[in-house]
Amino acid sequence: MASVQWHSRTRKYESELHMCRLEVLAVEFSEYHPLKAITVTDSKSRRGGRKGSTSSSSSSSSSVAPDPLSSMLYGTDPLSLFAAVSETPTLPHSISLGRKREEEVGSDFEPWSSKRGEILSRFTTTEKLSINLFMGSDKSKASSPSSAVSEKVRTRLEELDDLEEGSQRELLNLSQQDYVNRIEELNQSLKEAWGSDQKVKALKIIVQPKSSLLTLIMHISGLVVNSSSKFCVSVLQALRYVEAALLKCNRFLTKSGIQEMLQRLTAMIRGIGDPLVAVYARAYLCRVGMEVAPHLKDSLNKNFFDLLASFRQVHGESVQNQLVLQRVEIPIYLTLYSPAIHWILQCVAYRAPEDYINCAEIWVEFTCRHFTKREVNTVLADIIKHITPDRAFEDAYPQLQSVIKKILTYFHDFSVLFSMEKFLPFLDMFQKDSVRVEVCKSIMEVFIKHQQEPTRDPVILNALLHVCKTMHDSVNALTLDDEKRALSLLINGFICMVSFGRDFEQQLSFCVEARATFCNLEPVIIHLIHTVNQLAMETRHHSRKTAAFVRACAAYGFITIPSLTSIFSRLNLYLLSGQVALANQCLSQADAFLKAAVSLLPEVPRTISIEGKQRSSEPFLLDFINNFLSTLLVVPDHPEQGVLYLVRGLLNMVQDYTWEDNSDAKIRVYISALPLLGAMSQESYLYTIPKVDSNETLYGGDPKFIAEINKLCETLIGQVLDHLKGLGRDEVRYCVSKSIYTLQT
């Protein structure tokens, strides 16, 4: 077998020396750095015994900074120097103002100090507790700045020996408040030790295994913690807490020191075997991370997902055995996680309107599908809490609209929907008019589609009135006619679904309120007048106060109709309201409506706008007059007016109206009036209204009445013949044939 010869590798000492040197970073002009203006003395010494004297050393001035960990023993480490600089009154202004805005936590973030009180009030116990206290010695006194370096090193080495020997005492039978007070004393001692440069003493206080809120909570929950318990925080884990607490100092070493250290500590926590200890370690790391760099969300997210991954350990054999040993049930044990999980989630969600709302948009569907209105209301409340500050909702309208649509997909019972306390406040976040109207339209579309029966639920009515009013108030002079029709259709659909049963007065009151609320949408007002007329007709069979109520309905119409802009809407509603009043034996109201219609005829324009196009109004006017004439057959003459005063008034208006050139519309009205007069001359009319005496009853075939009808017919026929004389033969044949046909029918 051939022999193998080993050779040492070739080394390049200059390159290795260059690689081992500390990284040199450029410092901005406005940025403070504790090492910037410091001249460091490079000392070379021989390593001696722990308590032996140091040998003499030679020093030389150098511009290269030595290892800060080595210089810690000599009191020249960056942390000590920074502490010394911080205590001087000549602190540069850039220190306090140099921190970026993104690295500051605002007042909208709930601090841990307020959380602690809430946790202690939630987890209470009457059992007696114990705590270990560090008993400091005189050897831990801070050395003066003028002390020799060797003396300082000797003192710290003696402190380490004292730490190993142990200088603690255990206090027993403490109440919960005494326990908290002792922890506060330890905290204050820690601050004083660190501030007076007693680093070892501070370390002794930190590694106390029972000086944590976690331990107190476990005591309260029945987990007996002792020095050998796996739930205790070990010294190694305590050092991780120390390292996390010093995160802020890393900004003076490297630019990316904080981010790298957060990632490293996050990964180190994965090595903690106990999930409960690990979750509180993550909570503390998140707390420190929020203090030094709240904008670094990666470590926060990793801690949260690591928490989820480690949670499966709860059902592992190790934890289960420990719970059996401690006689603790799983539900009680799981409550111990809630403070830490709540804190971690608060840190993750802080100032995230975009990330949060994107997540909430997805999860709200899961909540709607599998839970009740209580959980959905909780989700809405949480969204409002996160999106309202700084008007963040203005950048999340699409997501908020999606949330509304998903809720409407699963909740069709509007009594349940509007009983959610946070639903209407959620709608109030839609401040932009166009978006708000679209949301309201989607609500009304679902209501009209899925509401099976009329409702009188005050919760639904008040909420939907608010929704409809929002749509109505968006109408202005620039609103397109199509948009007005769409909104009116939705509002009318809501009005149709409102019913108070036989409480007709309440129904009329609702219509009065709706008229004031939706006054800018004419189709809605027209629909309300129709609704009131229908209501008046229904009272004939149910109400004992028919006449009084019908008069109230008539007053509603008489006040409302003049507000309409469409003249044919006014004419038709006057006629309809007159017919309803007549059917309810309210003769004076019917007479007033019909007279108002006759007096309005001269105002009819020769052209009207229909769907944006100008058209002749004659066909519509002729149609209205024919309907009006058919109603006059059953209308009795007013005792204080002349015979057939309404017929004469109508014909006089037709005579004076300015018709189109070469139009035969007026003659057609005369021809249509002849059958009416013929029907009025009969002994019994073709149709009558119950409980209403028509002219056949009033006049009883009186010859004078018949004579008046004949005179009026002669006048109309004369007008027709005069018109025929001015026409050609074909036109005469047409008119005569039409007249004969009209008289026969």
Image (spheres, rainbow, N blue to C red):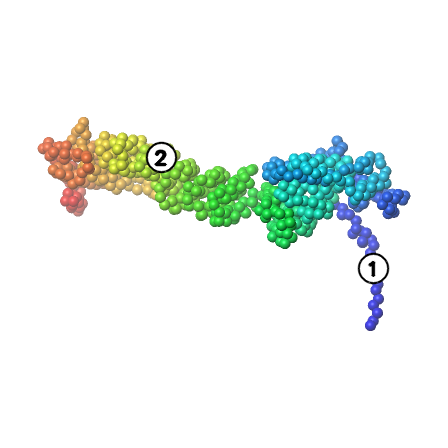
Marker disc for residue 510: 2
- In which image quadrant can residue 143 be found? top right
* Circle 1 residue: 10
Q: Nearer the viewer, residue 665 or 127?
A: 127
Question: x, y (%) of residue 138?
Answer: 81, 36
Could you tell me if residue 432 is visible in this image?
A: no
| Horizontal side of residue 154 vs 96, given as left or right | right
Name the mark on residue 60. Answer: none
Nearer to me, 289 or 99:
289
Give the quarter of the image for residue 233: top right
- Which residue is at 78% across, 42% downward? 166
Q: Is residue 460 visible?
A: yes
Q: Is residue 24 above or below residue 698?
A: below
Q: Position of residue 529 (x, y in %)?
A: 31, 36
Position of residue 60 in the picture relative to residue 495 (left or right): right
Query: Residue 598: where, in percent of width, then height?
Result: 24, 33
Quadrant where the image shows the N terminus? bottom right
Which amino acid lies under the numbered mark 2 shown in the image of this protein? Phe
